[in-house]
Amino acid sequence: MQRTITYLYPNMKKASSLKVFQDRTNQIRAFYFTRENIKEVEKLESGTNYAVYFLFNEADDDGLTKVYIGQSTKGANRMLSHEKEKSFWSYCIMFVTDNNSFDAMSIDYMEYHFINKLKNSSTYSLENTNVKSEPVVSIFDKPNLKAYIEQIEFLLKAEGIDFSEQLVTVGSDFYYPRNKNYHAKISIKEGIFVLHAGSIINMPIESSKHWADQGRFYNRYSEMIRRLLNDGKITSKENAYETLVNLTFKSPSTIASLVSGRAENGWLFFEGLNDLRNIN
């Protein structure tokens, strides 16, 4: 089934940092904007309507991208407080309806839905700290809310954002650690390395606190594991952690370091993986 999305660039000089997009057969409208363009969005039609929004960071490493999910009764106006209070985000995608048909119940439910969906995401890490219980919603309202959610997910995917768990293609090749003391399985999908659910990862070794990098390795991987644990993407297992969902990374070395707790060359850590680089 084909779909058409119309893009509007309110300021040609800011084409990469401010845009509005919408399937014109649907009332849901999306705003993409960077931190410095919040006030510009406020001036746009529907920019202060009831909204559900996503704050993203620009990941500068091989970790999961952080996302904060929120709701607003005043659209982009809510982001003015986030500009000061939440320093991690660099851009926002905000969803409203062009006729302002969202209400408090609908944005509350959609916020809840996406927060819980993010817990199973392979690529994104939840920045929210206070997770609410499921809002009480009438069975008569749920079909409309489901339609809202499906349209928002479609518009997010149009921007290359998918909160779903990364599923593995049938017939994929799998790679395992050369050292049989480690228990993990990875595959490759569209150039991204997938660490499979059921793999075991380890905290960085204590001695890495005192490496010449001044503890950066230890701090980075400790924080990564803490976030995965808070998201419910991993669970404690004896003295290590077991992955509960498939996790994606740009580099096999990040996965190998998570698995062993040591700095590793992932291409050599997983048996047969380095052969891929020698294929002409």
Image (cartoon, rainbow, N blue to C red):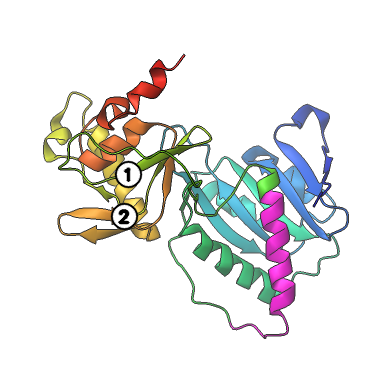
Marks 2/1 in contact by CB < 8 Å: the verdict is: yes
Part of the protein shown in magenta: 136-156
Q: Position of residue 142 (x, y in %)?
A: 69, 78
For the stretch drawn in magenta, the main secondary structure is: helix
Q: Quadrant of residue 96?
A: bottom right
The residue that mark 2 highlights is 198
Q: Position of residue 176 (x, y in %)?
A: 28, 39
Give the side of residue 41 with respect to residue 197, left or right.
Answer: right
In this view, the residue in front, 117 or 186, is 186
The residue that mark 1 highlights is 185
* Residue at x-position 30% and y-position 49%: 225
> Label 2, label 1: how many angstroms apart (C-alpha)?
8 Å
In this view, the residue in front, 19 or 269, is 269
Give the side of residue 128 with respect to residue 200, left or right.
Answer: right
Above or below, comparing residue 211 to residue 257 in the picture: above
SS for dot 1? loop
Above or below, comparing residue 174 to residue 166 in the picture: above
Q: Is residue 73 visible?
A: no
